[in-house]
Image (cartoon, rainbow, N blue to C red):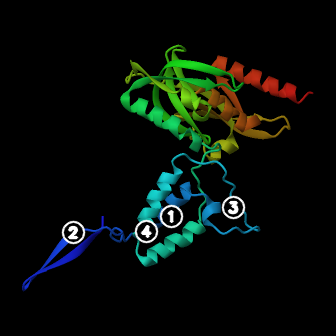
């Protein structure tokens, strides 16, 4: 980007030529909507405590964790902002230091130290090669996983997950990136099956009418309302509830969402998943009896 005019003289002839310059690129002139979008994009990845003045009466969101891609993205945005006109650059700087929307794409754990792990996995995905690695479970016991088909990395609930197919378990699994032992990720000679697809779990649940009215969860792959009915609650009040049929990839996430709904939801089917939910609620109840 960026060009300059060079002048050369020979006897009575002056020649001008356009050559690629070494200075900053040309000036970008964005419309107001594009400029606001650039500010918002910056706010998605910026640490607000770094760019804004600290005001004890209006504390900014705490942000110790780091997105492993934030630094590179911010560098690109700031290079683009440097090419704005003086007026637009002033506007950008002002709102970058005091964003009107705090919508940060950070993670709840610092994933920057795991960037090498991510890079190795991405390379394996691009080459369509299987990988193996050591993985720490919730009990922090390291288990070797071999012959894993890596498909993609997703951001869910503040964490980064590898979606991969385990040939040993004969199913798709979700591996949290920060629980993968960094030095243990190795590519294997076998190729992945590019045609394999995850099979969604179909389930149904009752949800309180007040929640359904404000909008059903968009976490599911799809959902449809089967029917709505009235019922009398434990206080003798008439309420309404909605039966929802939905699909999702992960049974654990279905249960977690049901927990978030609390007594406002009831998992109906499939029977085996309902039984798992019943046992979890029973264990929770037992915890509060001690």
Residue 246's x, y, as percent?
56, 31
Asked if one can make out residue 249 in the rendered structure from this viewpoint, the answer is: no
Residue at which label 4 appears: 82
The Cα atoms of the two marked residues, 1 and 4, are separated by: 13 Å
Q: Which mark is residue 60?
A: 3
The Cα atoms of the two marked residues, 3 and 2, are separated by: 47 Å
The Cα atoms of the two marked residues, 4 and 3, are separated by: 26 Å
Along the polypeptide, which appears first: circle 4 or circle 2?
2
Along the polypeptide, which appears first: circle 4 or circle 3?
3
Along the polypeptide, which appears first: circle 1 or circle 3?
1
Locate the C terminus by quadrant: top right
The Cα atoms of the two marked residues, 4 and 2, are separated by: 21 Å
User: Which is closer to the viewer, label 4 or label 2?
Assistant: 2
Mark 2 packing: few (<14 Cα in 10 Å), some, or many (20+)? few
Q: Residue furthest bottom?
A: 12
Q: Which mark is residue 39?
A: 1
User: Which is closer to the viewer, label 3 or label 2?
Assistant: 2
Residue 144's x, y, as percent?
58, 19
Asked if one can make out residue 196 in the rendered structure from this viewpoint, the answer is: yes
Residue shown at the point (67%, 43%) measured from the top left: 211
| Mark 4–mark 2 CB contact (< 8 Å) | no
Q: In which quadrant of the rendered view does residue 177 lie?
A: top right
Disc 3, SS: loop
Locate the N terminus by quadrant: bottom left
Q: 34 above or below 261?
A: below
């Amino acid at each position: 980007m960026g060009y300059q005019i060079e002048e050369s003289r020979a006897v009575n002839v002056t020649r001008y030529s356009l050559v690629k310059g070494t200075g900053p690129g040309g000036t970008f002139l964005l419309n107001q909507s594009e400029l606001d979008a650039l500010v918002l994009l910056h706010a998605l990845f910026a640490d607000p405590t770094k760019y804004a003045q600290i005001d004890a009466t209006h504390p900014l969101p705490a942000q110790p964790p780091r997105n492993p891609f934030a630094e590179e993205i911010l560098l690109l945005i700031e290079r683009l902002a440097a090419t704005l006109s003086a007026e637009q650059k002033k506007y950008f700087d002002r709102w970058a230091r005091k964003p009107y929307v705090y919508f940060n794409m950070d993670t709840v754990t610092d994933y920057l130290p795991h960037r090498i792990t991510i890079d190795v996995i991405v390379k394996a995905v691009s080459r369509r090669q299987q990988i193996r690695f050591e993985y720490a479970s919730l009990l922090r016991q390291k288990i070797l996983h071999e012959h894993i088909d890596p498909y993609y990395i997703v951001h869910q609930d503040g964490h980064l997950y590898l979606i991969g197919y385990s040939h040993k378990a004969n199913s798709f699994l979700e591996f949290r990136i920060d629980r993968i032992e960094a030095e243990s990720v190795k590519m294997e000679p076998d190729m992945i099956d590019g045609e394999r697809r995850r099979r969604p779990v179909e389930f149904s649940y009752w949800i309180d009418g007040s929640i359904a009215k404000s909008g059903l969860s968009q976490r599911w792959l799809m959902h449809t309302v089967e029917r709505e009915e009235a019922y009398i609650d434990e206080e003798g009040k008439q309420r309404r509830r909605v039966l929802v049929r939905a699909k999702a990839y992960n049974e654990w996430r279905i249960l977690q969402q049901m927990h978030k709904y609390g007594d406002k939801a009831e998992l109906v089917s499939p029977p085996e998943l309902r039984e798992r939910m019943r046992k979890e609620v029973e264990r929770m109840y037992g915890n509060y009896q001690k």
